[in-house]
Image: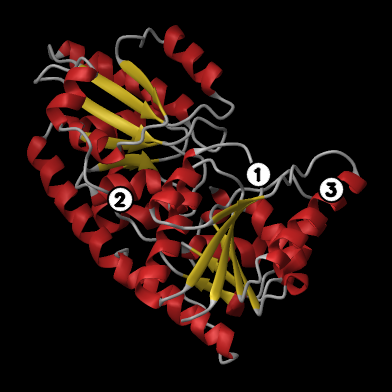
Amino acid sequence: MEKRLVFVLAGEVLGGAERNALLLASHLVRNEGAVVEICALDDRPGRARAVAAADDLPWTSVSTPWSGGRRAKALSLWRAARTLRGLRPDALLSSTNLPNVVCGLTWRFSGAQVSLWNQCDVLPTSRFSDGLFRRALHSSPLVVTTAFQARDWLACEWGADVRRIHVIRSEVSLPAAERSRKEWRAELGLADGDLAACMLGHLHVGKDHDTLLRAWRLVVDAFEGEGRRCVLLLAGRPAGTHHAIKALAFDLALRDRIRFLGDVEDVSGLLDAVDLAVFSSRSEALGRGATEPMYAGLPVAATDVPGIREAVGEPGIPFLALPGEVAGLADSILRLARDAELRARVGQANAELIRDRQSADVTTSAYADLLARALSGGLAAQPPEPSLAGWQHA
């Protein structure tokens, strides 16, 4: 595939969507011979650019604030469109709302043969009017989602043609740990007998740390009644809700039973240091906060929303709690926390599921095939899969 692919990201912050895009870009370069450029619509510094540089992926940034009045937004759109045109793409691959809308509106001007809209969540956006979001979506020739429930959301909420929406699971992999379990636990002040749980997820309104902290208070009480100690580790950058979450931790007297780790680079080492993962969220497409711990062989206690249910599959469904149900989430955590054999069995099943379903070979091949057919003009519509019921109630 000797084509020029431009991956368009919202900025240099490294979240799940950005990690997915950079993994895919690297594999398309190595395995398919593609020429790749990364274009970020925000020039503020972040970890994503360093990750791209480590894989020798060229990077261009253009400030696209999408703020102010209509004229200011039109100028932002023009700057982004001019930058994309200068990169001479054969195909644009966008991820998250701002890049998706920008590429949906400008891909023809850029000279690209095709634009691929990647839907990474199932959250409404206040950044754009419904009409503009819908117009950009309908103007995009191809749409990819990581989950069937995200496909259904686009079709039912936004009127997208389901035949143009292709479901391709995102790759899940982790690099070697930088520090050992022993080193991590020593740094965190964890004794050998302490049970440690972690949640991977930036501290923003899409996650439900409130329910998790209230559930953790119940877990701590139960463990203390048994003469045991447990600690919750929250890994994720502050993104709007961190002050409220820290205040709640104080109110719940969890100060010595919780650690706020910020944006963790050595995710592999952290996951090796804990005994189980938790993932409390209000809405997900196919959350990496569940799939990365699964890849690492951990059991996951989580919220029963469609994207997480789809992520954990059969091994993890027994450990899901209804959204906002504090006692239910605490019960799921405790069942895993009290039974080491159960944790090992579920963790092994999780790892096998992720490696079978979301290996680099599977995901890269699917993307490469889709792009090759699109660029050759021979793309046929993908037939719809059975609908995942219940997403509209999440």
Residue type at mark 2: give it. Answer: Ile
Image: 166 above or below 306: below
Residue at the disc numbered 1: 42
Quarter occupied by residue 102: bottom right
Q: What is the x, y in percent for residue 196?
A: 22, 26
Residue at 46% x, 28% y: name it: 209
Q: Is residue 146 left or right of residue 183?
A: right
Tell me whether the residue at label 3 lies in contact with that at label 2, contact meaning CB atoms closer than 8 angstroms: no
Q: Is residue 125 left or right of residue 385?
A: right
Mark nearer the viewer, 1 or 2: 1
The residue nearer to you, when weighing 92 against 340, is: 92
Q: What is the x, y in percent for residue 194?
A: 15, 20
Residue at 33% x, 72% y: name it: 362
Residue at the disc numbered 2: 317
Q: What is the x, y in percent for residue 38?
A: 55, 57
Secondary structure of the residue carrying numbered label 1: loop
Q: What is the x, y in percent for residue 78?
A: 82, 57
The circle drawn on residue 244 is none
Image: 367 above or below 329: below
Q: CA distance from mark 3 to mark 2?
A: 44 Å
Residue type at mark 3: give it. Answer: Lys
Quarter occupied by residue 326: top left
Mark nearer the viewer, 3 or 2: 3
Categorize mark 3 by other alpha carbons within 10 Å: few (<14), some (14-19), many (20+): some
The residue nearer to you, when weighing 113 against 219, is: 113
Categorize mark 2 by other alpha carbons within 10 Å: few (<14), some (14-19), many (20+): some
* Lower sequence index among marks 1 and 2: 1
Q: CA distance from mark 1 to mark 2?
A: 38 Å
Residue type at mark 1: give it. Answer: Asp
Residue at the disc numbered 3: 73
Secondary structure of the residue carrying numbered label 2: helix
